[in-house]
Amino acid sequence: MNNTPTTEERIWAVLAHLSAIAFGMGILLPIIGWSEQRRKSKYASFQCLQALGYQSLGYTIWLLSYLLLIVAFVVVMVVSLSATGNNGNNLDTFMGIWTTILTIIIFGTLGLYFLLPVIAAIACALGKDFRYAIMGKRLAHYLGYDSKDNEWLSEDHEDRWVAAMGHFSVIITLWGMLAPLSAWILQGGRSLFLKFQSIQTLAYQVFVTLLFFGGIFVYIVGAFVLLSVVGLNGSASINTSAGMTGLVIFLVFMLVFLAIILIVPLFHIMGQWAGYRVLKGDNYLYPVLGKFIEKWMLKLGSEENLK
């Protein structure tokens, strides 16, 4: 990329990268920018798709790394506490040190996640051809960005990247649905592949989101039943028949809640697998749902052709 980007190109690139600060809600903006610039600016299109990848695939990697880091920290802390055998006198000091370390880890990693897109935005504002570490170079190759033979990015790989990022964004609760929804609305009329993948991804994310919030609702209902039986201050005895009934209902609802919370990550994993398969060249179909969406689109297409 030797040509200096125009002001319009730089503005779209800057906005696409800075939208990561919205922490999920901003995933809409890179798709809008790509849709607007895809046959106007190779530079802006690439930067928008790179920003989309950072907010979807990058967020997934960041979140998983973050969770692993926290788990490792807790394990090391517990082992250290057991090994040192702290007594009551210096336990407060010991826990204070570990709490400080945990605070640094939490806010440090969060700050790093926000810092990178800010750096990207500043670089693009100066007209630089910014690339995220690891992902940027691979994406440029995947899209044919550095090719001198093609004026624009590879259309097939553009669509696959956007579709895959929609699948990956299932891990972003609620706001992740903005990715497939916007891709469907903005580019579904041009690409049948992107339309199908976006529709089935949106339906899949709606299902996973309802399942997640349904689990929370089940827990709240169970807790409400228990509190209404024993009272807010526990004045009613749990040993009464009403109290035992409330406790059993609460435990059943709690088990349902735990089952749902354990199942939801499996659906997240399936979403990541779907994104990977799309990038590898497959027209991925979710079990049951994919076939249903495919038949619905074929039927809808046939009805439109008859009109």
Image (tube, helix red, strand yellow):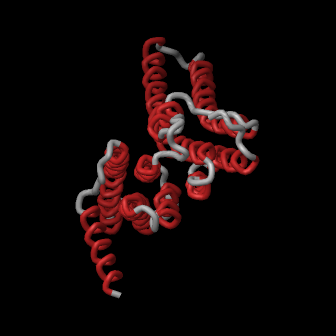
Is there any visible trace of residue 230 in the rendered image?
A: no
Frontmost residue, 274 versus 242: 274
Q: Report the side of 69 relative to 93 (left or right).
A: left
- State the residue at coordinates (55%, 28%): 133
Q: Report the side of 138 relative to 265 (left or right).
A: right
Residue lying at the far front of the rendered structure = 149
Frontmost residue, 163 versus 215: 163
Frontmost residue, 96 versus 282: 282
Residue 207, horizontal then vertical, whole percent: 37, 63
Residue lying at the far bottom of the rendered structure = 307
Residue 299, horizontal then vertical, whole percent: 28, 77
Q: Quadrant of the N terminus?
A: top right
- State the residue at coordinates (57%, 23%): 98
Q: Report the side of 77 relative to 98 (left or right).
A: left
Residue 69, horizontal then vertical, whole percent: 48, 28
Tag count: 0
- State the residue at coordinates (73%, 51%): 8
Is there any visible trace of residue 252 in the rendered image?
A: yes
Residue 243, horizontal then vertical, whole percent: 35, 64
Establish if 29 lies above or below 303: above
Q: Quadrant of the C terminus?
A: bottom left
Establish if 96 lies above or below 301: above
- State the residue at coordinates (53%, 57%): 175
Q: Report the side of 107 relative to 210 (left or right).
A: right
Establish if 293 lies above or below 23: below
